[in-house]
């Protein structure tokens, strides 16, 4: 953000409640009442989203990180850097750490000994104050159908049938032995000292990617939650991807998982960069849809959004998005209270990226949005639609504290949902009425560490494409 933009942040115009802003025609708005939604404790006992690093970003875009290989040594190299980032602790492995075609004698997943030793990795990470995450998918291996579930005489093939397309059969979740199989896997993870489990390819959701996933795989989420509970080890359950947001299933996810993926994978398909702005626009819109659905069904959520890997740590030529866009990504992940799981190459963070990830004032905002997620309030109406010029509010908490984000997403590159075409710098302005609040607030610009004084009627900022501001409001 340039200082030109900060000085352009003009606030508190008039006492009428209507903010006169260039390019923004306003009639007296009939903004709907603000429904304040909060996050409460998750099913496995967490009060904030996971923060850490995951290997998928580099795995999907290996040209970003020359010489990298998905093995113990390279993961440790990344996560030793993670240990130096205040507030981040979870070092999570994506697909590829385990043996591909079969499990152990009881059909439980095994680590690929050529590249990983999971208990040793866990010990190393724990010695640095970090936590270990592993990746799994629903079902047992087709190769294991004749093996018996530990401490039973039930063969896996008695309770698991068909082929879901990931070399696994599909469990019949009504069978008690199926829970025992999940318990045995969670017990093994507990023995290895795993702290975080990413369960991918959950349905409904996980739109067809060439697999033959069952229409309703929500039983896997319930079974993993119960299995983690009975294991006695505190582990997070992160479910993926782009999960169904209808009421029935949203409630199941909310009761059983700690975070859920709101979008498909964020990556740049083997490019030498991590992500493109088009994909980021899609990720923001998917979060918007997610929180709008959540507002319909819940007064508080017990699950955090997972917007997928946070790809902001490396310089613009490696991240694939400009510095202003990187800041906008960080702002939206923080505003959402989403998992802050970095996908960047941590061995090459630039100064800008390091500040985005570790800025103390921004982390304080993340602690606030771990309790109050932001929701869209369209400039001029207070509506919830996708807009090129968007405003968001988190809270206010009973103390009067709130967080406001103003953004100009630039032209819709195809997946943003808002269809805007202007690449001009524009005023983005939100009155208190648009935001659904009343009174006088002291406003602070977080990234620029600038006090913007007491404001009585609204906030606005002149923003170029991809730019945004992150503001805290405290009742004056
Ligand atoms: C399981 O056992 C049956 C019966 O012995 C055999 O026909 C089948 O090939 C076995 N399947 C696997 C995957 O080992
Ligand atoms: C990212 O990854 C998914 C599969 O994991 C793929 O379908 C998608 O096309 C990829 N690329 C982009 C630009 O999102
Ligand atoms: C960006 O960072 C990469 C390492 O991630 C480095 O090789 C490259 O020289 C940097 N480019 C610029 C323009 O600073």
Image (tube, rainbow, N blue to C red):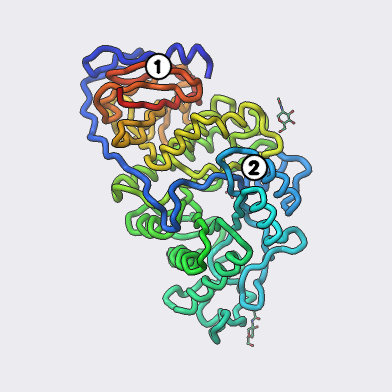
The 10 Å Cα crowd at callout 2, few under 14, some 14 to 19, many 20 or more, is many
Nearer the N terminus, badge 2 or badge 1? 2
Q: Position of residue 314 (x, y in %)?
A: 65, 33
Seen from the viewer's position, the closer of residues 233 and 56 is 233
Q: Is mark 1 within 8 Å of ligand 3?
A: no
Q: Position of residue 5 (x, y in %)?
A: 48, 15
Q: In terms of secondary structure, where does tag 1 sit? A: strand
Labelled pair 2, 1 in contact (Cβ < 8 Å): no
Left or right? Give the position of 450 relative to 58.
left
Left or right? Give the position of 465 relative to 117.
left
**Residue at the spot of label 2:** 82
Seen from the viewer's position, the closer of residues 93 and 39 is 39
The structure residue drawn at horizontal position 30% and vertical position 22%, both measured from the top left corner, is 476
**Residue at the spot of label 1:** 452
From this view, report whether residue 413 is shown above or below residue 188.
Answer: above
Q: In terms of secondary structure, where does tag 2 sit? A: helix
């Amino acid at each position: 953000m340039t200082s030109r933009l900060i000085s352009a942040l003009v606030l508190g115009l008039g006492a009428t409640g209507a903010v006169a802003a260039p390019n923004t025609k306003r009639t007296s708005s009939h903004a709907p009442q603000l429904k304040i939604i909060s996050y409460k404790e998750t099913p496995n006992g967490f009060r904030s989203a996971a923060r850490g690093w995951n290997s998928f970003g580099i795995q999907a875009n290996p040209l970003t990180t020359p010489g990298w290989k998905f093995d113990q040594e390279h993961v440790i190299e990344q996560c030793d850097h993670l240990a130096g980032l205040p507030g981040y602790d979870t070092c999570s492995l994506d697909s590829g750490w385990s043996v591909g075609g079969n499990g152990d004698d009881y059909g439980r997943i095994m680590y690929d000994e050529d590249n990983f030793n999971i208990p040793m990795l866990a010990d190393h990470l724990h010695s640095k104050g970090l936590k270990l995450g592993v990746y799994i998918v629903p079902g047992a291996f087709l190769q294991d159908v004749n093996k018996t579930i530990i401490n039973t005489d039930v063969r896996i093939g008695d309770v698991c049938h068909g082929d879901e397309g990931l070399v696994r059969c599909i469990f019949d979740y009504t069978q008690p032995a199926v829970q025992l199989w999940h318990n045995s896997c969670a017990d093994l993870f507990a023995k290895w000292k795993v702290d975080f489990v990413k369960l991918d390819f959950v349905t409904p959701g996980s739109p067809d990617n060439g697999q033959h996933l069952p229409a309703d795989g929500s039983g896997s989420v319930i079974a993993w939650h119960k299995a983690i509970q009975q294991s006695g080890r505190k582990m997070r359950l992160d479910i993926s991807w782009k999960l169904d947001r209808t009421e029935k299933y949203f409630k199941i996810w909310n009761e059983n998982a700690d975070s859920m993926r709101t979008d498909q994978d964020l990556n740049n398909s083997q490019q030498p960069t991590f992500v493109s702005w088009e994909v980021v626009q899609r990720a923001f819109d998917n979060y918007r849809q997610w929180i709008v659905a959540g507002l319909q069904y819940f007064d508080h959520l017990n699950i955090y959004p997972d917007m997928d890997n946070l790809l902001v740590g490396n310089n613009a030529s490696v991240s694939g998005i400009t510095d202003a866009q990187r800041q906008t990504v960080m702002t939206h992940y923080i505003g959402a209270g989403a998992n802050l799981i970095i996908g960047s190459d941590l061995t090459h963070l630039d100064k800008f990226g390091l500040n985005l990830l570790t800025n103390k004032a921004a982390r304080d905002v993340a602690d606030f949005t771990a309790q109050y997620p932001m929701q869209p309030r369209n400039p001029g109406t207070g509506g919830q639609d996708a807009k090129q010029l968007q405003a968001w509010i988190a809270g206010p908490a009973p103390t009067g504290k709130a967080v406001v984000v103003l953004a100009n997403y630039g032209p819709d590159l195809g997946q943003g949902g808002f269809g805007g075409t202007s690449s001009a710098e524009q005023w983005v302005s939100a009155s208190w009425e648009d935001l659904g609040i009343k009174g006088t607030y002291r406003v602070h610009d977080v990234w620029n560490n600038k006090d913007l004084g007491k404001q009585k009627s609204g906030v606005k900022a002149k923003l170029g494409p991809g730019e945004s501001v992150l503001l805290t409001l405290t009742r004056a």
